[in-house]
Amino acid sequence: MFENGIRGGLVQASKRYAMANNVKTPGYDEIKEKSWIIYQDCNNLYGWAMSQYMPYGGFNWVEPKLNGLNDLDDTSPIGRVYEVDVSYPRHLHNGHNDLPFLPQNSVPRGSKVRKLMATFEKKENYIVHYRNLQQAIKNGLIVEKVHRVIQFNQSDWEDEPEDDWPELDFMGGKEGWNWNEEEKGLMRDLLQCLT
């Protein structure tokens, strides 16, 4: 289930021309709606993701319903991943046109290569983390069917004392790597860089 939720980098064709309309731009028209142009260069997204609550055990299948979804928040001791069918109501298309929710892998017209695309198409058997599903529902997307739900324990592993970190299992077990003290220190330092 988790492997089917891995999607990769997003491909997006944005509008080629945009014009800002606000008091700081030449040709400002106060009759028209105010607008701004912003360029975002997002860095360290992986680092941010690794600083969120992470699953650590207690994985089990639960009843395939949305019950309890609204009770979960970013710091809940349990988390869930859903497999759902989701539709995108037509009245949301204009408002969400710049970046639709729930991108999916598909082959665009005229191509033979699968790409991750943000579209308004219906999503079937879509694997989604509970936080992303909450956001999509809050913004008007409709869950038509819940196929499966896996629940797990999660925690903010960064706040755990180092002695409580789970033993790292590299290369298939304790015998896999015999680390000397310098290598252990390097790994500890690398892990602490995430915090």
Image (spheres, helix red, strand yellow):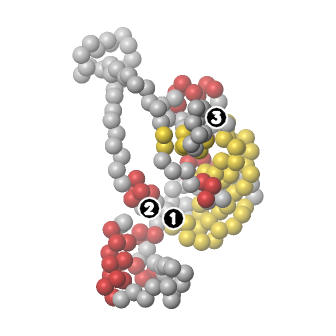
Q: Is residue 75 visible?
A: yes
Q: Which residue is drawn at the image coordinates 66% and 59% (left, top)?
A: 1
Q: Dot 1: what SS?
A: strand
Residue at position x 28%, y 14% in the image: 28
Picture coordinates of residue 128, whole percent (x, y) = 61, 51
Q: Name the residue under label 3.
A: 121
The image quadrant where one finds the C terminus is: bottom left
* Cα distance in 3D space between marks 2 and 1: 8 Å
* Distance (Cα) linking label 3 and label 2: 30 Å
Secondary structure at badge 2 equals helix
In x, y percent, where is residue 49? 44, 57
- The kind of secondary structure element at disc 3 is loop
Query: Residue 17's x, y, as percent?
Result: 38, 22
The amino acid marked with disc number 2 is Met
Amino acid found under the numbered disc labelled 1 = Met
Q: How crowded is mark 3: few (under 14 residues within 10 Å), some or many (20 or more)?
A: some
Residue density around tag 1, few if under 14, some if 14–19, many if 20 or more, within 10 Å: some
Q: Pick the residue in front: 169 or 163.
A: 169
**Could you tell me residue 69's position as x and y percent?**
64, 52
Q: Mark 1 points at which residue?
A: 54
The quadrant where residue 141 appears: top right
Callout 2 touching callout 1 (CB < 8 Å): yes
Mark number, residue 50: 2
Which circle, 3 or 2, is nearer the viewer? 3
